Amino acid sequence: MPYRPLRARIHLAAIRHNYRLAKQAASTAKALAVIKANAYGHGAVAVARALAPEADGFAVSCLEEALELRDSGIEAPILLLEGVFAPDELPLTARLDLTVVIHNRLQLAWVLGARPDRPLGCWIKLDTGMHRLGFAPEELPEVMASLEDCPHVRLQAAMTHFARADEPEHPYTAKQIAAFERALAGKRIASSLANSAALLSEPRAHGDWTRPGIMLYGASPFADPTRPLLGDLRLRPAMTLESALIAIKELAPGEPVGYGGRFVCTRPTRLGIAALGYADGYPRHAPDGTPIAVAGQLTRLIGRVSMDLLTLDLTDIAAQPGDRVELWGEQVSVGAVAAASGTIAYELLTGIGRRVPLIHE
Ligand SMILES: *Cc1c(COP(=O)(O)O)cnc(C)c1O
């Protein structure tokens, strides 16, 4: 057992529940569960094992992440979202039966020039407006033709990625969909467009394969995390980040709390000190007032977050040393902590510190 009371409890049943909702929300499409970045901090192998009986496949960002899954016995299709970074990765990629994204000419030349032992599954990525990775839509016919002519390639799908799907009313997503549809018109190739936000807000983007990530972990994909998701659909938070109160003190009005004295008591204050800080992944930018739950009661952060500790207001609630403190989870949404701190749930979940034990349950 860890010595500090800090841990991240990972609810695998919640992830399975959320994956099923992703499948239901886009019922004509298959869904690649995106488990890059250690499944957004939740433990990629445990998440993949939990989803393996029902997932259509997985997506990760690089060969190392896929290798970890194959080493743990995951046999489902795995897509490398950025493809390979050098041609010498291709033999192992083919041997592990991974599917690569091809997003530029360099990767295309590597794939065409490779001599893998087994056929290599490929997706073509189109840049419809994100302007990060991908071929221009006009290049699709030529890229497709060269891959179709290549005996060691199995061309499987064309994909694109949205820049503003987290703002569901924004017209830019419709422009991207239109550009993608124009490029694919009349072509016999499967399509993949939707991340979580598009999956939940843009039926025209469902295509043949969706790519849900953040929604699997129970956080809203929308820029406004209070926005309703889709009908009465409810995601279940998959991570509870918790620690315990290790000290309590009484402070008089006028006393400052913590580094820089950012918070100054305006009334007689009971201060709680919890064993968790920014080195564990809690945002140092969290302002006074950020929600925190203690023994099931909602209260607020006061004072600047330090490396190993943070301080909270116990004045109006009942609490004693040893009580459980929830930083995010079922009572406090990770989206609310992120919004208060000027960031997004993705950054907090993927930023869980190395010394936080993940407890899968
Ligand atoms: C990370 C990623 C996703 C998943 O996005 P979410 O917003 O987490 O659902 C989908 N597609 C690509 C290309 C990605 O890189």
Image: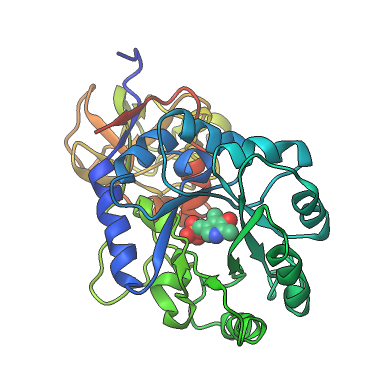
Answer with the quarter of the image where residue 358 lies. Answer: top left
Pick the front one: 252 or 41? 41
Residue at figure coordinates x 53%, y 41% from the top left: 37
Q: Note whether 91 is above or below 163 in the view shown.
A: above
Q: Name the residue located 76 percent from the left edge and 45 percent from the top edge.
A: 114
| Residue 269 visible in image | no
* On screen, residue 51 above or below 135: above
Is residue 266 shown left or right of residue 166? left
Residue 70 image point, x, y percent: 48, 34
Quadrant including the C terminus: top left
- What residue is shown at x 42% (from left), y 71% (from top)? 199
Q: Nearer the viewer, residue 356 or 75?
A: 75
Closer-to-camera residue (313/76): 76
Q: Residue at x 57, y 78 (%)?
A: 188
Q: Would residue 246 be seen by someone viewing this image from the given angle?
A: yes
- Where 137 sits versus 263, above or below? below
Q: Is residue 146 left or right of residue 79?
A: right
Residue 153 position, x and y percent, is 66, 56
